Amino acid sequence: MSILLKKILNKQSGKEGDEKEMGFLDHLEELRWHVIRAGISVVVFAIIALIFQTEVFEYIIFAPKKASFPTYRFFCAVSEATCFSPPNMQLITREMGEQFFMGITVSLYLGLIVSFPYIFYEFWKFIKPGLYENEVKVANRLIAVVSLLFIVGVCFGYYVIAPFAITYLGNYTVGTEAINSPTLSSYVNYLTMFTLPVGIAFELPVVVYFLAKIGLVGPEMMKKYRREAFLVIFIVAAIITPPDALTQILVGIPMYLLYEISISVAKRVAAERKTEENLPKTEPDV
């Protein structure tokens, strides 16, 4: 087990000189309250989204299927060769409560996305007492980095992947007998798939940072398996995008760039670990 995990499990409470080691159940109780506060944040923003449900669906959820969406206007402004527009799809509902449940589902997803920085902040508050002072400074910066990467990933999925995917899948047909009339739940599920997983995938540099910190990965290993990583990245891109080569490239290239950035992150962490190991060890006072 890493030093960091040991410190977290052996967190102490109270003032110096009157320290009391926290038991396992105390840790669980503390973690429970962090989870509860994070959950309340999600619920609060979900309720706000539910109150403004009409505006949320009109200007956020249904926006990528309209020709006025910024992505379509941008590519059409570049040239006629790059210009494309979404199909005229009429979303339908097949079940009585489908619109009601989709309204709640979308509200919860938006609550999760908006609350993500606070959720990570609560996680950071839980592990903070087990960190050294220099590690706390790094963790403070990580909150902003993690939040930024997640939001950038979600926006990338929303403004890049979703328009291309909706256009490709909406126009794809196996014959004249089949007409594309997707259900509301199908549309929402696909839109979620194009955004949330991408936001999580953009956290790769942060994941590599922690793995390098505990010694599970290093820059040399990541360089050695560059080709394999390239293949895996484009396989993942093919899974989370429609079978369209352009969309897969648009997703795969940024993810591979993140992998290269992660190598730099691992290299920096390895250098810091080497410096710490070479520091002279002082004998304790007798």
Image: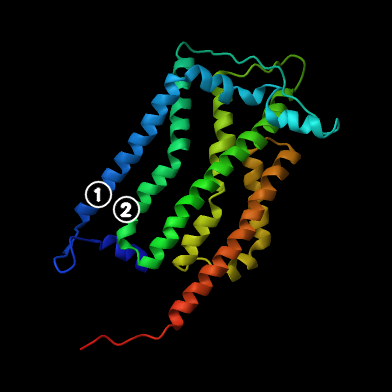
Disc 1 secondary structure class: helix
At a point 58% along the width and 30% down the height, the residue shown is 191
Mark 1: amino acid: Glu
Binning the other alpha carbons within 10 Å of mark 2 as few (below 14), some (14 to 19) or many (20 upward) gives: some
Where is residue 144? Give x, y as percent: 48, 50
At a point 62% along the width and 46% down the height, the residue shown is 236
Q: Are marks 1 and 2 in contact (CB under 8 Å)?
A: yes
At a point 74% along the width and 28% down the height, the residue shown is 73
At a point 65% along the width and 16% down the height, the residue shown is 181
In the image, residue 98 above or below residue 26: above
Label located before the other in sequence (1 or 2) = 1
Res 177 seen here = yes
C-alpha separation, residue under disc 1 versus residue under disc 2: 8 Å
Where is residue 7? Give x, y as percent: 30, 65
Res 198 seen here = no
Disc 2 secondary structure class: helix
Q: Which mark is residue 126?
A: 2
In the displayed structure image, the side of residue 227 where residue 147 appears, left or right:
left
The residue tagged 1 is 30
Residue 192 picture quarter? top right
Where the C terminus falls, by quadrant? bottom left
Mark 2: amino acid: Phe
Where is residue 240? Give x, y as percent: 61, 39
In the image, 233 versus 206, the foreground residue is 206
Where the N terminus falls, by quadrant? bottom left
In the image, 27 versus 48, the foreground residue is 48
